[in-house]
Image: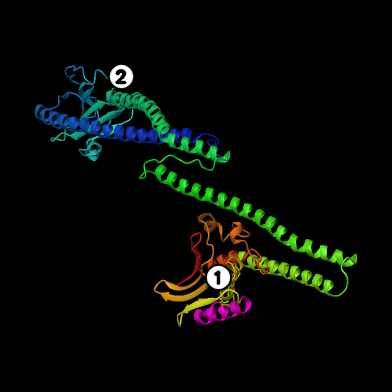
Amino acid sequence: MRSPFANSSLRNRLTIGVLVLSAIGFIGAGVGSQALLRNYLMKQVDEQLISVVGGTAQRLDQAGIAHDDDAPASATRSVTPLNRVPTQISVTVLDPFGNLVGGIGGDLNANKITDYVKGLLPGQVAAFGSKPFTVEAPGADFRVATTVLPSSLGSVIVAQSLRDFDQTTHQIGVVFLIIGGFVLLFIAFAARQVIKLSMRPLEKIEVTAEKIAAGDLSARLENFEPDTEVGRLSTSLNIMLSRIEESFAARAESENKLRRFVADASHELRTPLTSIRGFAELHRQGAVPDGEKTRELIGRIENESMRMGYLVEDLLMLARMDQSRELAMTDVDLSHLVSEAVSSALAAGPEHPITTDIAHDVHTQGDADKIYQVVTNLLANARAHTPEGTQIHVATYSNEDGSYITVADNGPGLSPEDQERIFERFYRVDSSRQRNSREGSGLGLSIVDEVMKAHGGTVSVASELGNGATFTLHFKA
């Protein structure tokens, strides 16, 4: 069954909760205080009755009880009335047979105690002992203390009406009820104000959440006191919002990169495809005569298809890296690997002299094939973007931070803007460093960056216009 307060606001529920708990506390305090007061007053009454009954019994025993000598013992004795005393306490004297001998006091009581104690024999009175007890009566009960006269000639019964006692305890309960009602009203007002003040930070959080829901991901919560619950909550939410904003920004950037990548890849593929289609169309139409011209045409088609093949292979390589496929990690001898890559580069581009400074026994953990491709790409990039005859220098070394490979040239260099974007896919530098080789796909440095990230390493570039460029591979220890 659904709670009736399920649809009420948190402020109302907290106020009602405070009132309910306060009411329970006041009721408990009132009932407990009233019980303690009753016990205290009853104890006072009992002490007073015991004092009266003890002194009265001794005096009456010394004075004796008047009898009618001519009447038989079983006959009704004549009662010698005592003086009237306007009080709620009454003293009643019974003879050994329970007959009323006399009494004093109790004139303010609506009921007479004699109506309830006549007939009590000394044995019955002795059974009560010295402990007071309550006699129930219409209207107001009596509190009674009894004793047997030392001479055993009768009993003394001292009683006090509990009318004032009941009125006092009842009035105390009413006073507690009235005071509790006023206090509850004050608590309700004070709790409402305190809760209202305490809820203000949550209202600010609500406003901020509405801004975020409306699309303002830069909205942040105020910095509340860090030692409070709301302060800790706002700090956590701000951290979460920052990460969400970063995630959305990264997603948007990724989508932009994907769109640029698709557009650039389409452009790169369209160029060789257009060339191949054009050459094929010329051949089909017979515009190129057989012989040397035909072989030249077929060679161009082959070169363009190879260029497209390189591009497709590089795209597949990047796609595999994006899928975070596991690398074949082994111990790689970087010194031997770089030497082989340099030998291949000298054979592929003898117009670019290469010098080396390769330290021995430089090792790392990684995928040898991927690392070999990274070094090859850097050497190809140096040949493709520098004039013929440009010196290329390759070095390897290691220290406590890890292993390093550097590929440097003394070509035209890179601008600071180019250095920031040189590893983006299909990024084009200025015309002074446009590639002059048909081998390039425009993705070589992007592959270098992705492979190094997969190995937990980094690739960096240092360059100045006119002073060449140096690419550094760092494999962490």
Give amino acid for label 1.
Answer: Thr
Q: Nearer the viewer, residue 317 or 157?
A: 317
User: Percent from the top left, x then y, of residue 133?
Assistant: 27, 35
Q: What stretch is highlighted in magenta?
A: 329-349
Is residue 341 magenta-colored?
yes
Residue 287 in which image quadrant: bottom right
Residue 325 in which image quadrant: bottom right
Disc 1 versus disc 2: nearer the observer: 1
Q: In this view, does 54 lie above or below 274?
A: above
Give amino acid for label 2.
Answer: Ala
- Residue picked out by circle 1: 390
User: Percent from the top left, x then y, of residue 432?
Assistant: 59, 59
Q: How many labels does the image show?
A: 2
Q: In this view, does 222 lie above or below 390?
A: above
**Quadrant of the frame with the N terminus:** top right
Q: Is residue 348 above or below residue 22?
A: below
Disc nearer the start of the sequence (1/2): 2
Disc 1 element: loop
Residue 96 at least partly seen: no
Q: Which of 8 and 42 is in front in this view?
A: 8
User: Percent from the top left, x then y, of residue 192?
Assistant: 42, 30
**Quadrant of the frame with the C terminus:** bottom left
**Residue appearing at x 66%, y 53% in the figure:** 259
Is residue 336 magenta-colored?
yes
Q: Nearer the viewer, residue 390 or 191?
A: 390
Residue 286 at least partly seen: yes
Label 1 – label 2 distance at C-alpha: 131 Å
* Magenta region, main secondary structure: helix
- Residue picked out by circle 2: 110
Disc 2 element: loop
User: Percent from the top left, x then y, of residue 103?
Assistant: 20, 23
**Residue appearing at x 36%, y 41% in the figure:** 225
